[in-house]
Image (cartoon, rainbow, N blue to C red):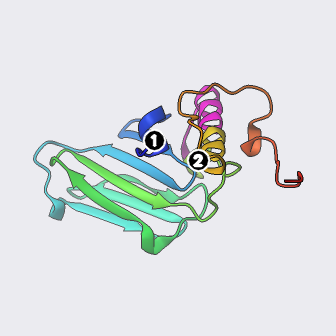
Amino acid sequence: MSAPFEERSGVVPCATPWGQWYQTLEEVFIEVQVPPGTRAQDIQCGLQSRHVALAVGGREIFKGKLFDSTIADEGTWTLEDRKMVRIVLTKTKRDAANCWTSLLESGYAADPWVQDQMQRKLTLERFQKENPGFDFSGAEISGNYTKGGPDFSNLEK
């Protein structure tokens, strides 16, 4: 079980006109398809705690207020194979109850089915983090998993 949870269990992507975004307990990933041969100097990317902006070749791809706050100085972007920009944002609130339902406050919302799948995934990731000796990557979950699932923190050990 040395691979990260998301590598073993897959991701739940939210499709957008420009690519997709998905999340883990700690991070939000944005993948933007750009024209083949794009160079790093063609990309303008602004990452702030609550705002993100991306333009390629002077054309705005998206810009707006993020769904929730991130740690600004931990955000990164990379150009991969000169055809995709990957932005990684670190969530300020890193728990299963903090499931983003959209990338921006004003757009790129996940449909209800995708939101449900994202919440299930984050809850299983939380269980994995709390119980490292078990493998929850292929598990199914039903019942109370909204807002991160049941809270066992007040149980006696």
Q: Residue type at mark 2?
A: Pro
Point out the stretch of residues depicted in magenta. 107-121
Image spot of residue 11 (x, y percent): 47, 36
Q: Nearer the viewer, residue 73 or 54?
A: 73
Q: Is residue 130 one of those drawn in magenta?
A: no
- Which of the numbered marks, if any, corresponds to residue 1? 1
Per the model, the C-alpha gap separating discs 2 and 1 is 9 Å
Q: Would residue 133 appear left or right of 44 to someone viewing this image? A: right
Which residue shows up at 54% across the image and 56% down it? 26
Quarter of the image holding residue 77?
A: bottom left
Q: Is residue 114 visible?
A: yes
Q: Residue type at mark 1?
A: Met
Label 1: element kind: loop
- Which of the numbered marks, if any, corresponds to residue 60? none
Quarter of the image holding residue 31?
A: top left
25 versus 44 height, above or below: above
Image spot of residue 37 (x, y percent): 10, 47
Q: Nearer the viewer, residue 147 or 37?
A: 147
Q: Nearer the viewer, residue 80 or 121?
A: 121
Predominant secondary structure, magenta span: helix
Task: Name the residue tied to disc 2.
Answer: 132
